Amino acid sequence: MHVDIRHDGAPSHGTIGRQAIRAAILWGLLFGCIQAASPMLIWWLAPGTVYAISLIVIAPIYIGFAVADGRPIIIAVESSVAAFFVLVAAAAITGPAWLLVIGLVGHALKDLWQHRRQYVAGTRWWAPFCCTVDLIAAALITLAILGGML
């Protein structure tokens, strides 16, 4: 494996090619649709609660990437960002469903920034995948809200 050092001192484990990004985005489309349909699989909970839980589940993944990166500042920043998204999701359980859309779009923007900056080392394909999942789920949840289903 090829390891370079980025301008900020973090190890870079190579770059991700266009084909890998395309594959990550295609898988993201599939999983975004699955996420949007997830309340049908967990029918005993309110759809907003299921979506909030799915937003909360993202947090430990990003904390894990930060721990794998190993830099204390990255761990602190990613843990703080994850805590913020957990709070948004928790508020969405009893608050307006639009908080879910805001949380998912906000997380997608964070993923896009992460992909461009490579702030956390070792997340080559994850950011484009997760950004796509978030945007597809946010779009479908928006349609459900506007259609009166949520």
Image (tube, helix red, strand yellow):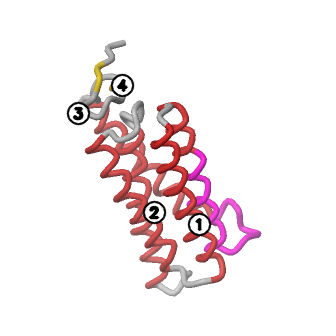
Three-letter code for the amino acid on which mark 4 is drawn = Pro
Which residue is the site of mark 3?
18
- Residue that appears at 31% across and 44% down: 115
Q: Which mark is residue 137?
A: 2
Mark 1–mark 4 distance (CA, rounded to whole Å): 34 Å
Mark 3–mark 2 distance (CA, rounded to whole Å): 23 Å
Q: Secondary structure at mark 1?
A: helix
Q: Secondary structure at mark 3?
A: helix
Q: Secondary structure at mark 2?
A: helix
Q: Which mark is residue 22?
A: none
Which residue is the site of mark 4?
11
N-term-proximal mark, 3 vs 4: 4
Main secondary structure type of the part rendered in magenta = helix
The reply to whether callout 1 and callout 3 are in contact (CB within 8 Å) is no
Which residue is the site of mark 1?
51
The reply to whether callout 1 and callout 4 are in contact (CB within 8 Å) is no
